[in-house]
Image (cartoon, rainbow, N blue to C red):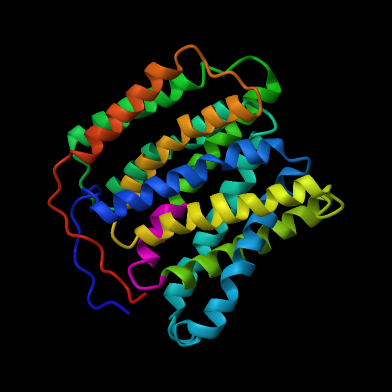
Amino acid sequence: MAGAEPERTAAIARPGMLDTALMGVGVVAVSTSGPIMAAMVAPALAIAFWRNALGAAVTMPWVLLRRRDELARLDPRQWRLVLVAGALLAAHFGTWVPSLTMTSVASATALVCLQPVWTAFIARTRGFAVRPRAWVGIAVAVAGAVALTGVDLSLDRTALTGDLLALLGGVFAAAYVTVGEEVRRSVSTVTYTTACYATAATLLLLACLLGGQPLGGYDARTWWLLGAITLGAQLLGHSIFNLILRTVSSTMVSVVLLLEVPGAALLAAWWLGETPPTLALPAIAAMLGGLGLVIASPSTGTAAAVPAE
């Protein structure tokens, strides 16, 4: 476990080279999430359940074999935070995954990726400083994300419901990474990730059973896609961002995740035939410019305490 936790006064600090490289890999991995889920022939909540359940199944043996002592040392507060994070992750998937079947992949991804706004507000209410240039960068990046949707807030009730669900998914994602940032100051990546995925899977399983959504009987292609999204977006994507939450703030992670928007839009255009809006290139440029402003923002805060891995 780490020693005393240093005080942080800034919500955003420049990531190191290793963290930057890891975030690049994570963004590519999570960008596959929306297009793959939109291509599946399976109930939305069932997809969310399986990606979390399979993710937990992959990491659980390692925790049971190598991290049992850490599990035994977790105090009630740590367990409470881990369970809250798992519940927020379940809420995130429970709102965002259904939105992919109701609106376009580009719109759903862009709206869920508005989470930096909510993360920055949460950080500010917790007493962290968010520099003016960072706020400008967030605003520019978010404007690019909104432009990328093609202003898809139409009068169609189904599309509007999907947009609102995606927006809620971003709120839950912001709360999830904020809690995760706190947990990762004292709990190792694999232990936190496994407990979080298992909690989310349990809650999503209950939702599937209550909603009568079938958990099996899918064709071979759907099972292959479930395996792909588990290995890619879940284990290589979400788990990498859980890893770097030990040294990178939740606000910075949320802003970097905005890059999922152009990634998902391009994949959806190539694989699903969903043509990106006319403003796609200027929107992507705005997102990258805004991200650059955030990363360049000065910070006086210190890094999070790094737990034993």
Q: Position of residue 239 (x, y in %)?
A: 48, 59
Q: Residue at x 80, y 55 (%)?
A: 215
Is 64 rendered above or below residue 42? Answer: below
Is 194 rendered above or below residue 242? Answer: below
Question: How many numbered marks have been drawn onto this rendered protein structure?
Answer: 0
From the image, which quarter does the C terminus lie in? bottom left
Q: Residue at x 59, y 27 (%)?
A: 270
Which of the 4 image quadrants contains residue 243? Answer: bottom left
Q: Residue at x 28, y 46 (%)?
A: 124
Q: Nearer the viewer, residue 105 or 83?
A: 105
Q: Nearer the viewer, residue 191 or 230?
A: 230
Viewed as shown, does residue 33 lie left or right of 28?
right
Which region of the structure is painted magenta?
176-188
Q: Residue furthest top?
A: 278
On whether residue 257 falls in the magenta region, the answer is: no
Viewed as shown, does residue 21 lie left or right of 58?
left
Q: Nearer the viewer, residue 135 or 236?
A: 236
On whether residue 187 falls in the magenta region, the answer is: yes
Q: Position of residue 117 (x, y in %)?
A: 37, 37
Q: Residue at x 47, y 21 (%)?
A: 148
Viewed as shown, does residue 237 lie left or right of 304?
right
Is 205 rendered above or below residue 163? Answer: below
Q: Position of residue 10 (x, y in %)?
A: 20, 50
Q: Residue furthest right?
A: 217
Question: Dominant secondary structure of the magenta stretch?
Answer: helix
From the image, which quarter does the N terminus lie in? bottom left
Q: Position of residue 43 (x, y in %)?
A: 77, 44
Is 170 rendered above or below residue 244? Answer: above
